[in-house]
Image: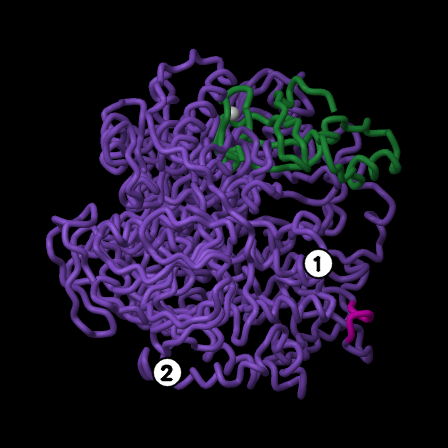
Chain colours: A purple, B green
Amino acid sequence: MRVQGKGLNANGAPLTFTFDGQEYQGREGDTLAAALLANGQRLVGRSFKYHRPRGILSAGSEEPNALVTLGEAAKQDPNIRATTQELFDGLEARSQNAWPSLKNDVMAVNDLMSPFLSAGFYYKTFMWPKAFWEKVYEPIIRRAAGLGALSGETNDDTYEKAFAHCDVLVIGAGPAGIMAALTAARAGLDVILADEDSRMGGRLLAETYDVDGQAGADWATQQIAELNAMENVRLMPRTTVAGAYDQGTYAALERVGHHRADRTGPRECFWRIVSKRSILCAGALERPIAFPNNDRPGIMTAGAVRSYLNRWGVAPGQAVTVFANNDDAHRTALDFIDAGVTVAGVIDSRDSAHALGDYPLFKGGQVIATKGRHGLTSITVEHSGGTEEIATDCLAMSGGWNPTVHLTCHMNGRPTWSDNIFSFVPTEGSVPNMSVAGAANGVFSTLGCLQDGIDTTQRVLVDLGVDAADVETPSAEDAPYRIEPLWQVEGKGRKWLDFQNDVTVKDIRLAALENFRSVEHMKRYTTQGMATDQGKNSNVAALAVLADATGRGIPETGTTTFRPPYSPVAIAAMGAGSQGHGFAPERLMTSHHATTSRGAPMIEAGLWYRPSYFPRSGEETWLDSCNREVTMVRGAVGVCDVSTLGKIDIQGPDAAAFLDFVYCNTFSTLKEKRVRYGLMLREDGHVMDDGTTACLGPNHYVMTTTTAAAGQVMRHLDWVSQALRPDLDVRFASVTEQWAQFAVAGPKSRDLLNTIFDDEIDNDSWPFMACGTVGISGVQGRLFRISFSGEHAYEIAVPARYGASLFGQLTAQAEAMGGGAYGMEALNVMRIEKGFITHAEIHGRTTAFDIGFDRMVSQKKDCIGNAPSRREGLLDPQREQLVGLKPIEADGKLTSGAHLFVEGADAVRLNSQGYVTSVCYSPTLGHDLGLAFLKDGPNRYGEHVILVDHLRDVRTLYEVCHPVFLDPEGELARG
Amino acid sequence: MRLPCPLCGDRDRREFFYQGAAVTLDRPARDAGDAAWNDYLHNRDNPAGETRDLWHHEAGCGAWIVVHRNTVTHEVYGAELAQKAKA
Ligand SMILES: [Zn+2]
């Protein structure tokens, strides 16, 4: 019900919205909760476990009950808190956890079953038969108990991530936060003021207090306008600071699009805010009182009831009652009387209570029962003068206020119990460089908050060595808090603590009775505080009940900790930009376009995309294309983009000595214009990577790495040069992306190159393993006569900007000569035929000895991994060493990952003699072949082994052979 | 988490690659023997408190740095270039 002339949005434009299909009118500036209450809609949801009818409890992000779903299908947003969702024209909200309808929910039968569903019921009831848990019980429980659901469809809404930096981050824009931001900003510091609400001002928007002689909300608006005009201030409304992390880093979620009907633009932005200092001014949250059936729609926290009246002009009921243990809640009665709404009574548990206005006061009173199935109709009050039933449709309750200490606990800090306010206050120093001011610090009067905001910030300025700012304290009310603790009311009926997880006083007592007396055990046994609201309304009262049940004090009982995020953050926001193509950077070769336009399927190699094969018409499978490409290279000529290999340019007087140290073999003997194969070890003596390094000129080398290990090798070179050998005068830089490089392989490779080179080459000027510069249509390129296929082959490199053009020229010429482009499949077949290793073989557990290269580890010099490679066990002949495998049985399958056994042995792990690393069909040899590691392998050529692959159900007899299947003398490459 | 690169200033942790304890700066001689090498390669303390460890400013200047920090409080006391640091 709207109250004429009340509310900060009294003149807001009318908006139309629906709830469960029913159309309603609201006002611009409303939250969904305010608009629902304005329309008399008190029932908004069903509880998690018992499907109890529930209404709106609060007016903020701590709301446990009023969770709704917005949007349809893929754009469905579940578990939106109606208390924070701003109303827009055309908003469509649906209730959750109720079927077939909110009023007639069949699962409400759970409520009748409640004697069986108390704390720990999962553990007691569903123990047997064991197999039923996963198949029967869990799915049923999950369906019955729940929150809103996701659609299961891919959502194309956008989310963003951003960084921000400041001197001072002020969290919360109530009276303390506003003064903190003003004090820091006037001192010239860079300030960010973040507040989860759409409008800044905090409780000043919800109360009728004056500040500096004007309405508190107006005063707040003026101060925010001043801050907004300052260049060193960034205001971040609708932004929840959700987590505190190391070195002044905070996570914050900005709701960017949720308040607009137009869904273009991002929904949310996930901020990482880095601050020198932070000031937490997050205010306080009011706690309910646990009295019998305190969960009926219409029973709300007293401060929230006041918020609806003062901020939105909504009376949540026509006959309001108040139940409290403190003076502050009496303001609810005063404000409603002032607005002309009936106040049917204030029940105050304190014998010392005094009426602050003209309303019936029940001193020493307690609410012992409530009525109303889908909404409150009456309460039964027991007080010093007797017992009576009072008709009321809105009960405003207040058990006191809890400082919002959550962020101070995010780095393992525990709050301190205060007997002044009967709640926890932040422990100083819980988060480095965070100060706390205002209600979050247990200071509850308006004047106290304003003053604490100034004083706290002045201390921060001193710490930062900044001159104090000139700030005057505004005048404001300074009423004492006056509270006596009241946690629970005895009586018939369930007394709810955690509304979101349906935990009652009885559940906590049962936990204590069953010896779950530690607060951490109680929490997990009862699920108290484990819902999405983290028990913001209920934890302190639950602790008090536990303390009472175990006969300990609250400080002794302790508290569970709060963890980030303060309120739920969508994974979509944290992962913003990482969907689809954003998942990882994509590195594309200069030939990418030409390659994909030839229909080549691309495969990932690290961040790179490389072609599997280049299909031609008539080829039906990848193997058809692969076989043709291998035959094409071995018979004519093929072209392959190898730009993805890491390239590192190394220069300096000590470049050769550096190479000698990082490679296990020697490079200082490498002549200019020559290339050498190099093997790189890790410091523990195992193989890290391999590749070729070319000497381009005096003290100038270019190293290649495998595609996948390029980053690791670069990091390693940085390590060696900076940390281990700073004595060497050498500099290096990654030039992988500066050069496009193509392999040209096959008997006609030189003929092809001579069609495009400015000057012809021949075998004398360019023998095997030669390198140097060549001219291609006036462009200077680098030519390396190296071969990964075993054929007469070259790699030609040009500056990347000429890559696409050169690839076009090379493939066109190759095709004219009976060849063409080839992909990774053919490249892999040809290297297996030649017994060349890749990271399938140098997988991190193999040594130079294992791959037959132990003689490459020069003993004339030290190098990375030199001494450790000769440690005991690493040169043992019984180690698994590289061999080839060739078939004995026709059609015998060969699979990579299969294990090898001697004939007759059981195919069990203990008998494994080794394993297969690479397999292919060789069109050159006409059969399958493979590379494997086998114990004492080099001495077992000719032996038969059984290959067993339990996963693919393969069992085949194979013959062990030398790993080089083709041209063992290497004559083809030299030809 | 932020790390103070001596060359770049305070930078986000995501720019760094983590390696491990700074004891690897003290590389044994080639002939130090298996025991010394095994210790160097495989034995590490697991301190609850102050530690010095190696980070590579991979997405920044490329410097290897030794960070002095506390594994319990997460406080970072400072950092120096590995090039100038002692194990
Ligand atoms: Zn740096």
Is residue A890 toward the left or the right of residue A827 in the image? Answer: right
Q: Residue at x 54, y 43 (%)?
A: A421
Q: Residues within 10 Å of mark 2 (few under 14, many from 20)?
A: some
Which chain is home to disc 1?
A
The residue stretch that appears in magenta: A908-912
Is residue A221 toward the left or the right of residue A435 in the image? Answer: left
Residue B8 makes an appearance in the image: yes
Q: Single out the residue that lies furthest toward the top.
A: A467
Q: Which amino acid, by three-letter code, is at mark 2?
A: Asp
Q: Using the image, tell me which numbered label, if any, was put on residue A430.
A: none
Q: Quadrant of the N terminus of chain A?
A: bottom left
Asked if ligand 1 lies within 8 A of label 1, the reply is: no
Residue A439 in the image: above or below residue A923: above
Tell me which corner region of the image, top left, top right, bottom left or bottom right, holds residue A917: bottom right
Q: Single out the residue that lies furthest toward the front.
A: A385
Residue named by callout 1: A518
- Can residue A416 be found in the magenta stretch? no
Q: Earlier in the sequence, mark 2 or mark 1?
A: 2
Q: Using the image, tell me which numbered label, if any, was put on residue A105.
A: 2
Residue A154 in the image: x percent, y percent?
33, 65
Is residue A906 toward the left or the right of residue A54 in the image? Answer: right
Marks 2 and 1, Cα distance to the nearest angstrom?
36 Å
Residue A511 in the image: x percent, y percent?
67, 68
Q: Which amino acid, by three-letter code, is at mark 1?
A: Ser
Residue A706 in the image: x percent, y percent?
54, 44
Please name the predominant secondary structure of the magenta segment in the image.
helix
Asked if ligand 1 lies within 8 A of label 2, the reply is: no
**Nearer to me, A72 or A512:** A512
